[in-house]
Image: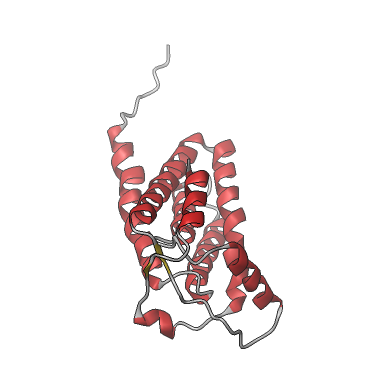
Amino acid sequence: IYCPWFYYLEQTVTKHFHVIHTAIDDKIPFVEYFIIPYYLWFPLVAAAVLYFFFKDKDEFYKIMKFLIIGMTIFLIFSTIYPNGQTLRPTVFERDNIFVELVKGLYKVDTPTNIFPSIHVYNSLAVYIAVRNSKHLKEKKWIQFGTWFLTTSIILATVFLKQHSILDMIGAFLIACPAYGFVYVVEPKAVPVLEKVHV
């Protein structure tokens, strides 16, 4: 239900919405180079979900629960409290391929339905899943690479003026209890059965 629900919000929340903004947002500069990690969010999430689906079903269910919790909260909040931002620059100081990519992003992605940032939340979901994976714990380059890309994507949301810093904070605030539910509380509730050799 996520895609049609989100599409509905994108079509209906266009002019009348609550503006999410802080004074800090005005101090954050626009940096077009962050468009690269921002676009890498799509293959990152897809690669993580596919990897765990084929490699570790238990971790796959965990990351899916984590993703579903955040995206459901996002949809409900955006439906009840239509929101958006007015941070995007109307004039660009530089003219390069990265600025052109940002302009393309602005054309297809509306500045509405932004709280909490799904880019931030889903990136955190991937990083947490990789950190907790028994198959990837010892692969330092994957651990570092995922951390670096996750951090870059999170920063990209504010440096590209796609999100207010409040959207970022909101994603972290939802990720904390989601982590507790998926990776702490629920595993303890499932009994561990010892293998019995007959």
Q: Is 195 in front, or is 154?
A: 154
> Horizontal and vertical percent for residue 42?
59, 55
**Residue sticking out furthest to the top:** 198
* Relative height, residue 20 to residue 183 (above, below): below
* Relative height, residue 196 to residue 139 (above, below): above
The C terminus lies in quadrant: top left
The residue at 35%/25% (across/down) is: 193
Q: Is 174 in front, or is 8?
A: 8
Residue 137 seen from this side: no
**Residue sticking out furthest to the bottom:** 93
State how many labels appear. 0
Q: Is 23 in front, or is 64?
A: 23
Residue 71 seen from this side: yes
Q: To which quarter of the image does residue 68 belong?
A: top left
> Horizontal and vertical percent for residue 115?
39, 61
The residue at 45%/66% (across/down) is: 15
Q: How is the image coloured?
A: secondary structure
* Relative height, residue 78 to residue 160 (above, below): above
The residue at 51%/76% (across/down) is: 88
**Residue sticking out furthest to the right:** 97
> Horizontal and vertical percent for residue 80?
33, 54
> Horizontal and vertical percent for residue 171?
38, 60
The residue at 50%/74% (across/down) is: 161
